[in-house]
Image (tube, rainbow, N blue to C red):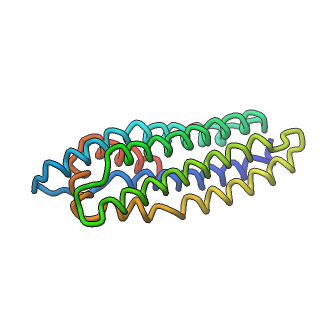
Amino acid sequence: MEGTNPVNKKLAAALSGGAVLVLALTGCGSSDDGDDKLNSWAQQVCDGVQPQAKKIEAANAAIQQQTSDNSSPEDVRKTDARAFQDMSDAYKAMGSAVRKAGAPDVEDGEKKQQDAVKELNALSSSYASLKKQVEDLETKDQAKFADGLKDIATELDKLSRSGNDALKALEEGEVGQAMAKQPSCKSASASASATTS
C-alpha cells in the first residue's frame, strides 16, 4: 500500500489547514462592554456554528486516521468521500446559521453577513465537488489512485489557503468581541485550534 500512503499524508496535511477556516468564525479576544443586540446575535451564530465545527473536526480526524493506517484505496476513497460530504454539509449549515441570525448591528453589517454566507456556501460547494472527485478515482490502479489523490490534495491546499476574508470581515471589531464572550464560540475555537496543531 505504499503508493498512496505519502499522498494520503499530504491530503491529511492539506485538510488540517481547512480547520483554520472554522477558526475564522469563532472570535477570540474578549470585551466587557455589553451590547445586548450584538451579544444575542453572536450567541445565535456561535450556537449554530459550534456543532458544525465539531463535524468538520470529526471529518478531519477520520481522514487523518485513514492516512495513518495502511488502508486500501477503496477504504481511503470511502472515508474521504464521506468526510468531504460532512464538511460540505457543515459549511452549508454554518452559512444558514449566519443567514438566520440576520445582519449584526454594526456598520456594513448586512454586507458583511451576506459576504460571509456567500463564502460559506462556496466552501460547501467546493467540498461537494471534492467528494465527487474522490468518488470518481480509480482504485484498481494504485499509481492512478495516488495521482488522483495528489490532485485532490493540491485543491484542498488551495481551498484551505483561500476564502475566509469575508468571515474575518464579519467578525471584526465589536462583532468579534461579542462572539468571544459566547461559550459555544470559545469551545469551537479551542477544538478547531487543537486540530491544526
Left or right: 120, with 151 as reference point: left
Left or right: 132, with 172 as reference point: right
Query: In the figure, residue 138 lies in which quadrant?
Result: top right
Q: Position of residue 163 (x, y in %)?
A: 51, 62
Left or right: 44, with 155 as reference point: left
Q: Residue at x 86, y 50 (%)?
A: 144
One can see residue 120 in this view: yes
Question: Eyeballing the image, is 111 above or below 90?
Answer: below
Q: Quadrant of the N terminus?
A: top right
Q: Position of residue 139 (x, y in %)?
A: 84, 40
The single residue placed furthest to the right in the displayed view is 141
Q: Position of residue 133 (x, y in %)?
A: 74, 47
Number of numbered discs visible in the structure rendering: 0
The single residue placed furthest to the left in the displayed view is 33
Query: In the figure, residue 103 lies in which quadrant?
Result: bottom left
Q: Residue at x 89, y 43 (%)?
A: 141
Question: Eyeballing the image, is 188 above or below 175?
Answer: above
Q: Residue at x 21, y 61 (%)?
A: 174
Q: Nearer the viewer, residue 136 or 80?
A: 136
Left or right: 46, with 143 as reference point: left
One can see residue 197 in this view: no
Q: Position of residue 7 (x, y in %)?
A: 72, 52
Q: Residue at x 29, y 64 (%)?
A: 172
